[in-house]
Image (spheres, rainbow, N blue to C red):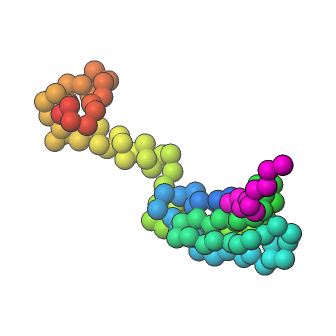
């Protein structure tokens, strides 16, 4: 019969906003729960390490996590669309890129 050392399973939650940060984690609700090994706080994520996946997943869901969205917190589909639209209407683009833009094509990096 095979014997394995104690397995540890992490479950991560990463900030949902690009370049956002972890503000606070209230882990009091999961302290003392069976199987908990450690709560790891990173710059933009938090991980729960437990003795199996199911427990780690359940404990992660019980955490009260607050994120600092930073400067990208106000980004939306519409703001990104406007940013791209502004770039496409930029009159400083000339030559091959301008012709492709008129035809609805696109350029890959280095095809200038």
**Considering the image in quadrants, where does the C terminus appear?**
top left
Residue 2 inside the magenta-drawn segment: yes
Does the rendering let one see residue 52?
A: yes
Q: Residue furthest left?
A: 95
Q: Quadrant of residue 54?
A: bottom right
Q: Quadrant of residue 94?
A: top left
Vertical relation: 19 (above or below) 25: above
The count of marks equals 0
Left or right, 44 with respect to 111, comes to right
| Residue displayed at 50% across by 45% down | 77
> Where in the figure is residue 5, as x and y percent of width and height?
74, 61
> Where in the figure is residue 53, as x and y percent of width and height?
76, 55
Residue 45 inside the magenta-drawn segment: no
| Residue displayed at 27% across by 30% down | 107
Left or right, 20 with respect to 48, comes to left
Q: Residue furthest top?
A: 103
Magenta extent: 1-10
Q: Residue furthest front?
A: 1
| Residue displayed at 58% across by 65% down | 45
Does the rendering let one see residue 29?
A: no
Viewer-proximal residue among 103 and 40 = 40
Viewer-proximal residue among 63 and 6 = 6
> Where in the figure is residue 82, as x and y percent of width and height?
40, 45
Vertical relation: 25 (above or below) 71: below
| Residue displayed at 45% across by 65% down | 71
> Where in the figure is residue 70, as x and y percent of width and height?
48, 68
Viewer-proximal residue among 26 and 17 = 26
Q: Main secondary structure of the magenta part?
A: loop
């Amino acid at each position: 019969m095979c014997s394995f050392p104690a397995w540890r399973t992490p479950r991560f939650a990463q900030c949902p906003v690009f370049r956002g940060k972890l503000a606070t984690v209230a882990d009091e609700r999961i302290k003392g729960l069976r199987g908990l090994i450690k709560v790891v706080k990173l710059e933009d994520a938090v991980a729960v390490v437990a003795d199996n996946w199911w427990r780690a997943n359940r404990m992660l869901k019980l955490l009260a996590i607050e994120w600092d969205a930073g400067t990208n917190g106000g980004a939306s589909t519409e703001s990104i669309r406007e940013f791209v639209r502004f770039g496409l209407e930029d009159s400083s683009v000339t030559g091959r890129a301008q012709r492709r833009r008129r035809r609805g094509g696109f350029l890959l990096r280095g095809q200038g």
